[in-house]
């Protein structure tokens, strides 16, 4: 190799390193600009006192960039886009009822993350904690605050695929008694006892009697709405093609996501409301695919999350199929309305 060739190779290497360095600087600058923009243009968030007592407030996971990202924050329910008060408690998923909260957290380790569920009192102090066997997906608390439930993906699989495994757990917040998986419950499908190796449950929602709950059962390539009985330890199928149910405040209707033919495989769901007395389905006026367990703001309004610039935004839509969907808050997910 001649001296001239060596010089050309050296100059080329220097040019490559300079280009890489410039690209890194530009990338970091762009990322910083974006973070500055989101902090400047996003919701105003300040530290303060957050409790799970209302009424008239909403608590949710803050997704805005900045020091309070992922913290539980609160706003007046009448002003969901207003300034936020941050608690310092971080959750991936959250829900609350009657002064009791459930917070699903990641515990970051040197090799991999683990997950846990915290049962919180009205001042967000931890009362109990439980291991969660996979990535947290859904969380609910009963209207009385006595029961909490959570769902986790085992192995990190996705709803959108045909092969996944979930674990749905329920805990009695008074006694600490844990049901680690609803798969231990007896299944009554189409009026007959049913057993299968591919059974999965997710998306628990509670009635106000401290006994009845609803959830999704998946088996044989189909999903079902099931009604559960905590005393008898049974679940009974009620309706097909129901995922992530959410019971209305009066216990008469279920809001849920339904797979609709013709939609993309990775975004197949439309929001519906099911009348539990007549089993009549009503499609809601949200045209986009919603991968969330919706909540009832009140007897007339459904609230849910959709992807947004900060990760997720909250929307609401009438529960009777009328009107249109509208965004009510940016950079927010896992809302709970305090009553």
Image: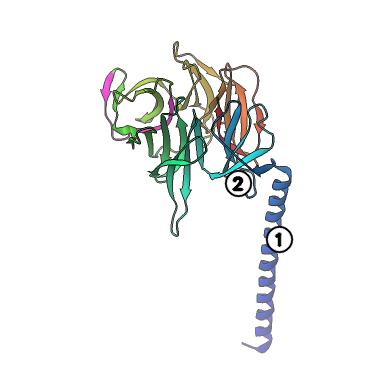
Residue drawn 33% across the image and 25% down it: 230
- Residue under the image location 69 percent in, 73 percent down: 15
Q: Is residue 216 above or below residue 69?
A: above
Closer-to-camera residue (265/117): 117
Q: Quadrant of the C terminus?
A: top right
Say which residue label 2 marks.
Answer: 69
Tell me residue 300's x, y (percent): 58, 18
Q: Is residue 134 magenta?
A: no
Q: Work out whether mark 2 precedes mark 1 in sequence or the reverse, and give the earlier one.
A: 1
Image x and y of residue 118, in percent: 44, 41
Q: Position of residue 280 (x, y in %)?
A: 48, 13
Q: Main secondary structure of the magenta part?
A: strand
The answer to whether residue 42 is left or right of residue 231 is right
Can you give x and y, in whole percent of width and height, for residue 28 in the image? 67, 59
Q: Which residues are magenta?
A: 192-206
x 42%, y 37%: residue: 151
Q: Which image quarter holds the N terminus?
A: bottom right
Name of the residue lying farthest toward the top: 278
Figure quadrant of residue 284: top right
Q: Which residue is mark 1?
A: 26
Say what secondary structure mark 2 lies in. Answer: loop
> In which quarter of the view is residue 60 placed?
top right
Crowd around label 2: few <14 · some 14–19 · many ≥20 (10 Å): many
In this orientation, does residue 107 appear? Answer: yes
Residue 226 appears in the picture as rendered: no
Q: How far apart are labels 2 and 1 at the CA level?
A: 25 Å
Is residue 201 on the magenta stretch? yes
Out of 253 and 242, give the one closest to the viewer. Answer: 253
Left of 230 or right of it: where is 289?
A: right
Q: Residues within 10 Å of mark 1 (few under 14, many from 20)?
A: few
Mark 2 or 1: the one toward you = 2
Q: Is residue 188 left or right of residue 36?
A: left
């Amino acid at each position: 190799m001649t001296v001239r060739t060596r010089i050309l190779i050296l100059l080329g290497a220097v040019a490559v390193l300079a280009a890489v360095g410039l690209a890194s600087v530009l990338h970091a600058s762009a990322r910083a600009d974006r973070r500055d923009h989101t902090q400047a243009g996003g919701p105003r968030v300040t530290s303060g006192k957050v409790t799970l007592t209302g009424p008239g407030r909403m608590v949710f996971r803050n997704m805005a960039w900045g020091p309070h990202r992922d913290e539980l924050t609160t706003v007046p329910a009448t002003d969901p886009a207003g300034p936020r008060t941050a608690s310092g408690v971080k959750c991936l998923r959250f829900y609350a009822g009657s002064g009791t909260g459930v917070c699903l957290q990641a515990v970051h380790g040197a090799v991999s993350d683990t997950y846990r569920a915290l049962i919180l009192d009205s001042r967000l102090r931890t009362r109990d904690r439980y291991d969660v066997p996979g990535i947290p997906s859904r969380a609910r608390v009963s209207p009385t605050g006595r029961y909490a439930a959570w769902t986790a993906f085992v192995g990190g699989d996705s709803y959108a695929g045909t092969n996944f495994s979930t674990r749905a757990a329920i805990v009695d917040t008074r006694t600490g008694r844990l049901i680690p998986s609803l798969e231990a419950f007896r299944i009554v499908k189409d009026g007959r006892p049913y057993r299968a190796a591919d059974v999965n449950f997710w998306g628990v929602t509670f009635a106000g009697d401290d006994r009845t709950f609803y959830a999704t059962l998946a088996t044989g390539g189909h999903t079902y709405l099931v009604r559960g009985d905590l005393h008898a330890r049974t679940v009974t199928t009620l309706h097909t093609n129901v995922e992530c149910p959410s019971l209305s405040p009066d216990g008469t209707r279920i809001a849920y996501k339904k797979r609709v033919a013709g939609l993309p495989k990775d975004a197949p769901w439309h929001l519906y409301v099911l009348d539990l007395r007549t089993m009549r389905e009503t499609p809601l006026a949200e045209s986009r695919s919603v991968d969330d367990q919706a909540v009832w703001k009140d007897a007339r309004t459904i609230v849910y999350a959709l992807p947004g610039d900060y990760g997720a935004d909250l929307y609401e839509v009438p529960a009777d199929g009328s009107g249109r969907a509208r965004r009510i808050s940016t950079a927010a997910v896992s809302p709970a309305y305090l009553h």
